[in-house]
C-alpha cells in the first residue's frame, strides 16, 4: 500500500478484471483490490452451498440435488458470441490458454405460444414453422442479401447504404411481415427491444458467429462457469506485474483539493494512484440508477421440454410475444432474466419459467442497474455500468473497451486470428 500506482482497480467483476489485465499488459502499475474474499463480484459463480447461503440463509441444500462442488451457478449468466468481442479480447490477451469452452447446443425463440429452434442453416430455415412458404421466399432473399453483403465491396450493397438506411427501411424493401421481423430482430440479431428498427442496419454479428463454428447456435460458454473469466484476466494481470488484494474492507476513494482522485484507503493505509477504475458500488455518489433486472434460477432434473433434450440452450421471448417493452432471456440449471418493467418479479418471469417444466428448486434474484454520472476527464474515476439482462457479453465488452480508450487514449485491436482459439474448440 506504500507504493504509488498508475491505476487502482476496485472490484473483481469481469469488467474490472478485463481492464486490469489490459492495463497491466500495457505495463501500467496496477493495484487491484476487492472488499470480498473471492473473485468475480456481481459476475461470480457459486457452488451449491454458497447459493443456498445467499438465498436461503442457514438452510442446507437437499442431499438429492448432489454435491456442492459439482455446481458452478453464475450470478450474471451470459453466453459468449463465438465471433464476438469477448472472444476477440480473450484471443488478443492470450487468456484462452487458461480456459476451456463448450459450444451451446441450440438457440430457440418463443413464437405464438410455442418455442422454435432458430435456424442455423439454409435447410433449417426452409423447414422451420416460423414462416409460411411465401414468407420463406421473401426472407430467403433478405438473408441472401445479408450473407453476401461486404462492407468494403459496394457491388454487394445493391445501392443501399446500411450505415444510413435504418433496419426498418431495409426490411420493408423485402416485404417481410411483423412476425418475421420479430424473429429476425430478436432471435437472430439479438436486439433486446425494438429501438434497433430506427437505427442503421449494419449488423452481421450473429451470422458471422454461426458461420465460424457451423453448429446449432452461435454461442460458447466457459466449461467451469463464468467465474473462470475474471480469474483468467486476473492471472493475466499478475503475470504482467499487477498486484491483487482481496478481503480489503471499506476501500475509500480519496480526492485532492481539485477533486481529482489521489488514492484509496483501506484499514488505515492509503495507496496513492493517478486513476481509479471501479464498479458502481465503490462510488455510489457518482452513479445513477437506470433500471432493475429480475432473474429466476431453477435447478431441474431434466432438460427444458421441447428443446430436443439439449443440455445447453438459449430461449428468447420477444417483447411483442409477451406484450412487453423489452425481451425476456432464459442444464439442468436454467436462468430466466428480464429487464424489470413493474414491481412484480414472479409475474414478469412467469412466461419463461412456464417453459421449464417441473422445477426442483427455484430462486429469485433482483438487482439494480447503475451507470456513471461523473466526468472521468475531471476526476480520473472510471466507473463501469451494471450488467444488463442480455444473454450475451457484447454490451459488457463494449463498456470495457470504451473505458480502456478513455483511460489510455488507445483502441484495443480486435482484428485477431480467430483460429487461435482452435485449441479450446476441442472441448466444445
Image (cartoon, rainbow, N blue to C red):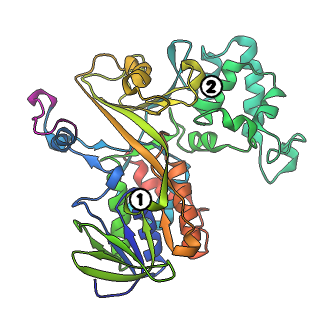
Q: Is residue 233 left or right of residue 61?
A: right
* Rendered residue at 36%/22% (across/down): 304
Residue 365: quadrant of the picture: top left
Disc on res. 183: 2
The mark nearer the N terminus, 2 or 1, is 2
Q: Is label 2 in contact with label 1 (beta carbons under 8 Å)?
A: no
- Which x, y percent locates residue 143? 72, 31
* Rendered residue at 44%/61% (across/down): 285
Hey, which residue is sitting farthest front in the picture? 257
Q: Which residue is mark 1?
A: 284
* Rendered residue at 26%/43% (across/down): 72
Foreground residue, 282 or 384? 282
- Which x, y percent locates residue 374? 54, 64
Quadrant for the N terminus in the image:
bottom left
Q: In the structure shown, which secondary structural element does the residue marked by tag 1 occupy? A: helix
Q: Callout 1 environment at 10 Å: few (<14), some (14 to 19), or many (20+)? A: few
Q: Is residue 252 left or right of residue 323?
A: left
Question: In 3D space, how far apart are the residues under numbered discs 2 and 1 (Cα atoms)?
Answer: 39 Å
Q: Find out whether residue 63 is within the magenta segment.
A: yes
* Residue 121 appears in view: yes
* Residue 384 appears in view: no
Foreground residue, 335 or 250? 250
- Which x, y percent locates residue 349? 41, 25
Q: In the structure shown, which secondary structural element does the residue marked by tag 2 occupy? A: helix
The part of the chain drawn in magenta is 55-65
Amino acid at each position: 500500500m506504500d507504493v504509488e500506482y498508475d491505476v487502482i482497480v476496485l472490484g473483481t467483476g469481469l469488467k474490472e478484471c478485463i481492464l486490469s489485465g489490459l492495463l497491466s499488459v500495457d505495463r501500467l502499475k496496477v493495484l487491484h483490490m476487492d472488499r470480498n474474499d473471492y473473485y468475480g463480484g456481481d459476475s461470480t459463480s457459486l457452488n451449491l452451498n454458497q447459493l443456498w447461503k445467499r438465498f436461503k440463509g442457514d438452510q442446507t441444500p437437499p442431499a438429492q440435488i448432489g454435491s456442492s462442488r459439482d455446481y458452478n451457478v453464475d450470478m450474471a449468466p451470459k453466453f459468449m458470441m463465438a465471433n464476438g468481442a469477448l472472444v476477440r479480447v480473450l484471443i488478443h490477451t492470450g487468456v484462452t490458454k487458461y480456459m476451456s469452452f463448450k459450444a451451446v447446443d441450440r438457440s430457440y425463440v418463443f413464437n405464438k405460444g410455442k418455442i422454435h429452434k432458430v435456424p442455423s442453416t439454409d435447410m433449417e430455415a426452409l423447414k422451420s414453422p416460423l414462416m409460411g412458404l411465401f414468407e420463406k421466399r421473401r426472407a430467403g432473399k433478405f438473408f441472401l442479401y445479408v450473407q453476401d453483403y461486404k462492407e468494403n465491396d459496394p457491388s454487394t450493397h445493391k445501392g443501399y447504404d446500411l450505415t444510413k438506411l435504418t433496419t426498418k427501411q431495409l426490411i420493408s424493401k423485402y416485404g417481410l411481415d411483423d412476425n418475421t421481423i420479430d424473429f429476425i430482430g430478436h432471435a437472430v440479431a439479438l436486439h433486446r427491444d425494438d429501438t434497433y428498427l430506427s437505427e442503421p442496419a449494419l449488423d452481421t454479428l450473429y451470422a458471422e458467429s454461426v458461420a465460424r463454428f457451423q453448429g446449432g447456435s452461435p454461442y460458447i460458454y466457459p466449461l467451469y462457469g463464468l467465474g473462470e473469466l475474471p480469474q483468467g484476466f486476473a492471472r493475466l494481470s499478475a503475470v504482467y506485474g499487477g498486484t491483487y488484494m482481496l478481503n480489503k474492507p471499506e476501500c475509500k476513494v480519496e480526492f485532492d483539493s481539485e477533486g481529482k482522485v489521489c488514492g484509496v484507503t483501506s484499514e488505515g493505509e492509503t495507496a496513492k494512484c493517478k486513476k481509479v477504475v471501479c464498479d458502481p458500488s465503490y462510488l455510489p455518489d457518482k452513479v445513477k440508477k437506470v433500471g432493475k433486472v429480475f432473474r429466476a434460477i431453477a435447478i431441474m432434473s431434466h432438460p427444458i421440454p421441447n428443446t430436443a433434450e439439449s443440455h445447453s440452450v438459449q430461449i428468447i421471448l420477444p417483447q411483442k410475444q409477451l406484450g412487453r417493452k423489452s425481451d425476456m432471456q432464459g442444464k439442468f440449471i436454467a436462468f430466466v432474466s428480464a429487464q424489470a418493467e413493474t414491481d412484480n418479479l414472479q409475474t414478469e418471469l412467469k412466461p419463461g419459467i412456464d417453459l421449464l417444466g417441473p422445477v426442483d428448486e427455484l430462486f429469485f434474484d433482483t438487482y439494480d442497474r447503475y451507470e456513471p454520472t461523473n466526468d472521468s476527464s475531471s476526476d480520473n474515476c472510471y466507473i463501469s455500468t451494471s450488467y444488463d439482462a442480455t444473454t450475451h457479453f457484447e454490451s459488457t465488452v463494449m463498456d470495457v473497451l470504451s473505458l480502456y480508450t478513455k483511460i489510455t487514449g488507445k483502441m484495443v485491436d480486435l482484428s485477431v486470428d480467430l483460429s487461435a482459439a482452435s485449441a479450446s474448440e476441442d472441448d466444445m
